[in-house]
Amino acid sequence: MKLNNNYIMRMLFSYLPILFITISVLIFIFFSIINQFNVRNAIQANNLTAEYITNMVDSSLKNISIDAQKMIETGGSLDQFLEEPSDRALNYEVSNQLSSLMVRYGLIDSVYLYRVKDGKVLDQSTIRPLDQFPDHSFVQSSLDQAYTGIWSSPRIRESIAQGSPSQIRVTSLGFKIPRDSGSLGYLMVNVKITSLNNYIGQMIDHTITDAQLYDAKGNSFFHAGQTAPSKNRLSADVVSDYTGWTYRISIKGGQLLDFLFHGSTLWVLLGLCAIVLAIGSMFYVTRRNYKPIESILHRIDRFSSIIKTSEPKEKENEFAFIDQAIERLITNNMAFQEQQQEHMVIRRQQFLQMLLKGEYKEDQAAWEQEWHHFGLSAGHFMVALLELDQYVQFGLKYSPSDQSLFKFIVSSVAVETAEQNGLKVIVEWISKNQLVILLISEESGGLEHQLLQLSEQIRAWVDSHLDFTVTIGIGTPADDEASIARSFEDAEAAVSRKVSVGVNQIIDAVEVKSKSDGEWFSYLEMIRTIVRQLRMSEAGWQNELSRLFSEMTVHRLRKDDVDRLVHYFIFHLEYELDGALPEAMKLWLQEGKPQLTAAAEQSDTLIQLEQNFVAALVQLSEHIEELSQSRRHNALMREIRDYVAEHFMDPNLSLTLLSDRFQISPKYLSQLFKESIGQNFSDFLIGLRIEYAKRLLRESDVTVQYISEMMGYANPTSFIRVFKKIVGLSPGQYRESETKERERE
């Protein structure tokens, strides 16, 4: 079979992602270079901004200097203060002049005037000797300077604010008075550095631009103690002709931009190298990898020519045979491995189930072979049974796949914990919520202690790392294979007592085995008492129910025993209700019985079971009490209605008379009439009398006046008005209409 070069082409095309990545990098470099033009524009903008800030700050400082010089040269009250003894009025006037300068310029922090004549300093607040002035050291040093009128480097101005000394960073401007000698005094103007920083900050965008100011010596105005770093190639420096200060405007993140800006040539070289290296690598790797493949293909070609019975298709190449062969091999191998795994799991589960139940094969040799096949050996054994707590909620909360994952985690934790303790165990899920842990040891001593310690570590790990808990029952030691079933039965009995002992703990069969299960007769008697009290709406049923659960807890009943008692409780309650109170059966069948049955199935502990029982039985008890009261009220109202129907013509019939006769309060009697009949007593009585009057009008010829007197009305007009209000017709009209009706018939 002639070999073709399709494989080489496929290998070449497989490297296209590398080429794609390389081109993407080059495109990024291209856009980075394009971005340099934007960076250049930003640099030019920084230069313009720096010049603008320099001009604005110099202009403000010059204006302050000019106004200060005008204040000195105009003389007036300022000269009087320096040359003549001053009084309080003159001090106040000069202080106002100093304050007016501060008002005109918000940058100024303070202005004060030193008088040589008596060595006192006047500021905006007071006049005091120089040695008592906080900033006296700077004033003294300024007097010794030959040249004044120059803005100083940033310095610390001593002051007193609210009675305590403070320090403020300022730049100062001083003038001798007169300018040539300073024999009269000295004027000092201080500009706060923070105000200067805020003033500059108003002219830039802090999100992308950073502004710094340095004096002639390179000291930073805005960062005390720092000096000017070396100039960045993207920053703009402008030196003021007026102050000699350096204004530096730079772009934030300037180091990265500087690298991008000045590395354009490097980027281009790296891009070209990447392309050349990628293409060369593709060809080199392809040719190198293809040489051994070509040798293998020749061997496959010779082999395939022997075993093939038909000529290959024109478009078929050597890889079709390889692909089919490998696919069959992998498929068969996976199927075989899966079958073997399933077979081993099933065999292991069956073997363990038989071992735990004490069912042995008749063929002892085959049994021993199976025993050794699963890694078991003769020795001493002990069984622990792990059970998931609240399994109903566990099944509702997690999907089947999540449940399987959690079960795998629990079994893995059991195996790994045993290995860490140097113990040999067999772990297997024997039901949907129970995991068997079989401990195997060559020595009999300390076997129970080892299993207790291992079980506690497993329980603690699950409690700490998972959202559910487990309860583990510990069986008794077994000295041979035949005793493993007994150990499992003890572990199963121990874990079944978690309903009364509690969940999320270790239950040792030795501790609960000696506990008595109590007298069944006493439990049944308590259940019958509770049901009777509940049916008769007696108040003590909840106390009896609490005593029942307390007794079951004290005697540590098993789950099966608790289930039998609970189902007897449900059966006996339904029997009593059906016989004595059938009206309550509807609510019992729809709500009460389903709630109690669900509580028995879903509750893992007696505490949960008692809470669910109380909630369901309280609702049922309230309904029973309502039915009982309704029964008593209905019987009483039937008797009262019969009496009223018999004596409604009695003029003395009233609520008071009925109250005395039936020993019930008039107010409660009126309420019963309203609830049972839907009318109050007076309306009910009038209705009976009007019906009797209508019958007399239909069936007799007695006069309306006679009927009125029979009804207890002294005035016939009152009777007629009441009759018409209720019937809609007067008595005469009613009799006439009834007569016409009979005639038509």
Image: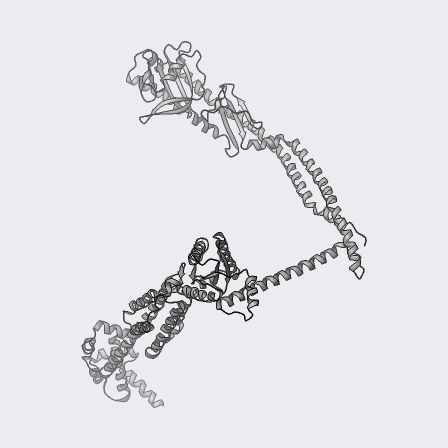
Which quadrant would the N terminus be assigned to in this image? bottom right
- Residue 312 appears in view: no
Answer left or right for 321 relative to 373. right
Splitting the image into 4 quarters, where does residue 743 fall?
bottom left
Q: Where is residue 538 in the image (x, y as percent from the top left)?
A: 27, 71
Q: On the rendered structure, is 702 left or right of 118?
A: left
Instruction: Find residue 121 and report its horizontal and vertical position in percent.
Output: 34, 17
Residue at point 54% right, 29% down?
250
Q: Can residue 190 be seen in this view?
A: yes
- Of 395 and 236, nearer the camera is 395
| Residue depicted at x 53% and y 66% | 351
- Quadrant for the C terminus, please: bottom left
Number of marks present in the image shown:
0
Quarter of the rendering containing residue 593: bottom left
Viewer-nearest residue: 734 or 638: 638
Return the x and y of residue 217 as percentages of the image width and height: 49, 19
